[in-house]
Amino acid sequence: SGVLNMGLFLKAGAQFLTAISGLQDPLYLKLIMTGLLLLVLFYTVLGGMVSVVITDLVQFVVLGIGMLVVTWFVVSHIGFDGFQDVVTVHDGYVDPTSGVNPTKPNVPAAGIGGGTMLQMAVVLFSALMLWPAGASRTLAVKSSEVAQQLYLYSTIPFLARRALPVLWGIGAFAFFKMNPELLSAFQSEVAASANGEGTGISSLSATPLFLAKIIPTGILGLVTAGMVAAFMSTHDSYLLCWSGVVTQDIVAPLFGPLSQRQRIFSTRISIIVIGAMLLVWGLWYETKANLWEYMATTGTVYLAGVLPVVVGGLYWKRSATAGAYVALLGGVTGVLAMGPAVNWMNLKLASGQVSFHIENWHMVLTTFTISSLGFVVVSLLFPQQTVPSSHQPKETT
C-alpha cells in the first residue's frame, strides 16, 4: 500500500517541472526525474536515516524560503481586491458542503460535499498519526519527550505546506480570469492534451504556469529548487521507511534473526528495488488515475486497517490478535474506492434500476467502518489468550 501510494509522485513532479520550466519534450522530463530519483537512491542507500535527516533539514529550509517567496509574489500580484473578485466578479465561490459543481450542474456528485470533507478529515487525521514515513522519525529519536516536541513543532510547516498552495491555486484562478486570452489558450491546450494532441498539460498545470508568469526568472529558479527539494525529501523518507518495513516484517520473519550487517544489506537492496518499481510505475508507465483519488485510496488500504489496531491495542484491554488480522484484511476493501471500481458498481446499480449513486468517499468511509467493526467483533468473539504468569519473561535489573 505504501509503495503504491508513492507510485505517482514522479509523474506529479514531472508535470510541475513541465509547466514551470516550459520544457515541451516529455522525454527530457522523464530523464530529469530519473536522474533525481537516482540521486535520492544514492544518498539514501549510503547514509540511511542520518542522510535523510540532514538532507531533509537543508531541503526544508530551501522549501520554506521558496514557499514564502511564492506567497509574497502571489499576494502582491493579485492583490486583495483580486482575491475578492474571485467571489464577487468571477463566481469563484463554491459551497464545499454541496455536492453540486456549479460549472457541471448536470454531473452527479461533481462538487465537494460534506461526505468528501469527512473522508479527507478521516484519512488525513489517520495519516498524521500513523503514516510510517512520518512516524519513522519519531521512532529514531532518543526519548518520547523529543518525539512529542518533534510532532508539536512540525505542526506549523505541516499546516503551511497544505494551506499556502491552496492560496496559490486561488491566485491562479484569479490570474487566468483576469487574462481571458491566456485562459482561452490554456483551456484549448488542456482540451487538446486530453485528446492526445497537445503537449500533455492538464488543469493541474494552471498553478505552475501562473507562477512562471509572475515570478522573475532568477527567483523562479529558487522556487523550483524548493519544490525539487520537497520532491527529494518525500522520496528519501518513503524509501527508507518502506524498505525498513520490508526488512523487519518480511525478510526477518522468513529468514530468521538477522545480524546488523544483514539488516543494512536487506534495507539497501529493498531501497533499490522500490526505486526501480517507482521509476517504471510512476513515470514510464502511463496511468489515468486521478492523483488525489489514487493517493487517498491506496492510503486507505493501509490506514483503515492500522487505525483500529493501534488505537485498540493501546487503549482497549479486550483487543485481540485475531481482531487485528481481520482489521488489516478489511483495509483491502479500500481498492473498491478506485474510480474504475466505483464506475462498475454504479453501472450495476443503474442496470438494476437503482437510483443510488456511489461516490469515492462512500467506499473510503465504508472501508474504515469495516476494519473497525471487524476488529471489535472478532476481538470479542476470539479473545486474546492470556499467558500464564510462570511463562511470562522475568524483569531483569
Image (cartoon, rainbow, N blue to C red):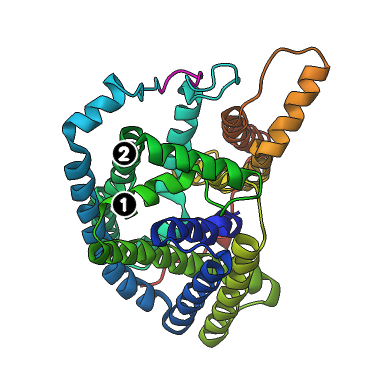
Predominant SS of the magenta segment: loop
Question: How packed is label 1: few (under 14 Cα within 10 Å), some, or many (20 or more)?
Answer: few
Identified by mark 1, the residue type is Lys
| Magenta-tinted stretch | 96-101
Q: Residue under circle 2? A: 175
Q: Where is residue 8 in the image (x, y as percent from the top left)?
A: 56, 56
Judged left or right of residue 43, residue 167 is: left
Q: Is residue 289 visible?
A: yes
Residue drawn at the location 68% of the way across and 15% of the way down: 356
Foreground of the two, 244 or 154: 154
Residue extending farthest to the bottom is 261
Residue drawn at the location 35% of the way across and 66% of the way down: 229
Identified by mark 2, the residue type is Phe
Give above or below for 167 relative to 222.
above
Residue extending farthest to the front is 181
Question: How packed is label 2: few (under 14 Cα within 10 Å), some, or many (20 or more)?
Answer: many
Q: Residue under circle 1? A: 213
The secondary structure type at the circle numbered 1 is: helix
Is residue 100 highlighted in magenta? Answer: yes
